[in-house]
Image (tube, rainbow, N blue to C red):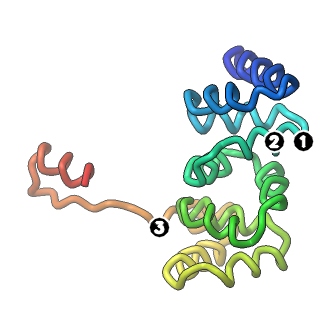
Amino acid sequence: MDQKTKLLANSISKLLRRGAERNIRRMLNKTHDADVAAVLEIFDTEARISVFQLVPDPERQANILSHLNKKFQVEIAHIFEISKLQQLLGFMDSDDAADLLGNLPDDLSQQVLSGLNRDELQEVEELMSYPEDSAGGLMSSEFLTINEALTVKESIEKIQS
C-alpha cells in the first residue's frame, strides 16, 4: 500500500471517529474512485460500509464497487436492497456487473438479475456464461468503432459524443 493511500485512510478514519461526515464527503469528492476503493479495503467492515454510504452519487458508488476486491464487493452488496443493487449494476460496465453477480450467492444474484431490463440482462448473462478466467469471462461487450477514413479531429469528436 502506498503512502498516499495510508494518509487518506488515516484522515478519513479520524474524521469518521469525530462524525465529520461532511468533511469525509468533501475528501471523497476530491479522490479518484480507484483510490477510494483502495482506502475502503483497509477499513474494517463497519467503517468500509459507513464510508461507502457517504458517496452520494450512485454512479460513483458503482464505479468504486467495480474497483473493490471480490470479498468487499460482496460484503457491500449485502447491505443494499435488490432495487439499489440493480441501480448500481445499471451504471457498471457489463463485465464488471457480471463479475459482481458471479460473486454473489446464487439466490441473491437471481433476484438482482430478475429486475434488470432485457438488454442489460442479455449482456450480463452472456458474460456470466464464460468461465471467469477465460477470454470471454475477462472481456467487455462495450466498445467503440471508428471508421478508418475519419480524420483525427473527426475521430475525437465521435469519441466525445
Q: 56 left or right of 139?
A: right
Residue 136 % position (x, y): 57, 68
Q: Residue at x 82, y 31 (%)?
A: 42
Residue 155 % position (x, y): 18, 50
Looking at the rendered structure, the secondary structure element under dot 3 is: loop
Mark 1 or 3: in front is 1
Looking at the rendered structure, the secondary structure element under dot 2 is: helix
Q: Residue at x 59, y 38 (%)?
A: 33
Mark 2 or 3: in front is 2
Dot 1: few (<14), some (14–19), or many (≥20) neighbours within 10 Å? few
Label 2–label 1 contact, CB within 8 A: yes
Task: Answer yes or no: is residue 1 visible.
Answer: no
Residue 79 % position (x, y): 83, 58
In front: 58, or 111? 58
Amino acid on which disc 2 is placed: Ser
Disc 2: which residue: 50
In front: 116, or 105? 116
**Image position of 41 with respect to 100: above or below:** above
Q: CA distance from mark 1 to mark 3?
A: 35 Å
Q: How many marks?
A: 3
Residue 100 % position (x, y): 71, 62
Amino acid on which disc 1 is placed: Glu
Disc 3: which residue: 141
User: Of the residues under marks 1 and 3, which one precedes in the sequence?
Assistant: 1
Which quarter of the figure has residue 9? top right
Dot 2: few (<14), some (14–19), or many (≥20) neighbours within 10 Å? few
Q: Which mark is residue 46?
A: 1
